[in-house]
Image (tube, grey):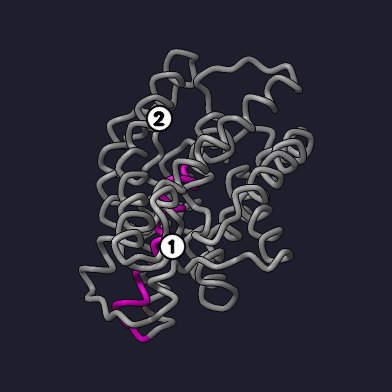
Amino acid sequence: MNKVYIHSKNTIDKYVLKYIYGLIPLVLYGIYKNGIILYNANLINFFSIFKVLYLIVISLIIYVIFSIITKRKLKLNLELLSILIIPLFMPYSINLLLYSISLFILLFIDYYLSKILKYNNISFIILGIILLLVIFNSYNYLNPIELTNNYLYTFLDLLFGRNPGGIATSSIIIGIILIIYFSIFTIYKQNIAISSIIVFLLLTGILNNFNINSLLNSNAILSFILMTPELKNTPVSLKGTIIYGIVVGIISALLCQFVSIYTGAFIGILLVSIVYGILHKFDKNKHL
């Protein structure tokens, strides 16, 4: 039975608020893994424990400034939700000043570009920031402990979040719990998230001779959960959401395997959303 995706103001407000509640465990684990553990190992100072919180606050400030300049009302909406998701996927090495400048610029690029082209704006902005990090030689998803390569983690360690990933997106277990939590919302498209994860894991397993650790790509799995099931530019029918998720899973698995394990899923999500946006635009009967 198909879900009904109602996009009324009240429904969107409640969805965004409950979605934000769901992000809290990821933020707390990010503070633990990329803050408290590093502090206890004498690798960072006390203030660096809360780096993910600084990124979130900076994102909100930039968004307020952007909204004032573009004369947009500040309210609970999908744009605000995107702004809160973006910092969670940032690499540990992110420079706060560079992040602030790049986010500000990319919000304006996205603002004008989205008027002529439909796409997943979260993946677009994340990839834009990462590109700037690469240009300025400030790109690294490994935190100081992971850089030493002195620790051997079990499968369960990696599953619970001790593997490299975004500053607050390394716990696959929390991600799985979030799918269940988000599924209580009538407008969360869990079919997209679940189908993309299943296909991604199957294809990744085949490409790596089913090496169990190769399946624990937290950046990819969390992006399928938090980014792919967006409301604006994805199918609404049961068949459409499943097919969309399958395509995202296939392309992302290939890109993670042959391009970048950390950013392949972002690229895959962006490419599929662009193609879908173009096809949907020319689908007069809106079957897609």
Q: Residue at x 35, y 72 (%)?
A: 215
Q: Which residue is mark 1?
A: 165
Asked if the residues shown at circle 1 and circle 2 are in contact, with their CB atoms under 8 angstroms apart, the answer is no
Q: Secondary structure at mark 2?
A: loop
Q: Residue at x 36, y 34 (%)?
A: 2
In the rendered structure, find residue 31 and report the number of the disc placed on it. Answer: none
Q: Amino acid at mark 2?
A: Ile
- Residue placed most toward the observer, 9 or 36: 36
Q: Residue at x 69, y 60 (%)?
A: 131
In x, y percent, where is residue 97? 65, 47
Magenta highlight range: 209-229
As drawn, 109 above or below 67: below
Number of marks drawn: 2
Quadrant including the N terminus = top left
Which of labels 1 and 2 is toward the front? 1
In x, y percent, where is residue 63? 62, 30
Magenta stretch: residue 227 in it?
yes
10 left or right of 98 in image = left
Q: Secondary structure at mark 1?
A: loop
Q: Which residue is mark 2?
A: 187
Magenta stretch: residue 103 in it?
no
Q: Main secondary structure of the magenta part?
A: helix
- Residue placed most toward the observer, 109 or 36: 36
As drawn, 256 above or below 110: below
Determine which quarter of the picture holds residue 109.
top right
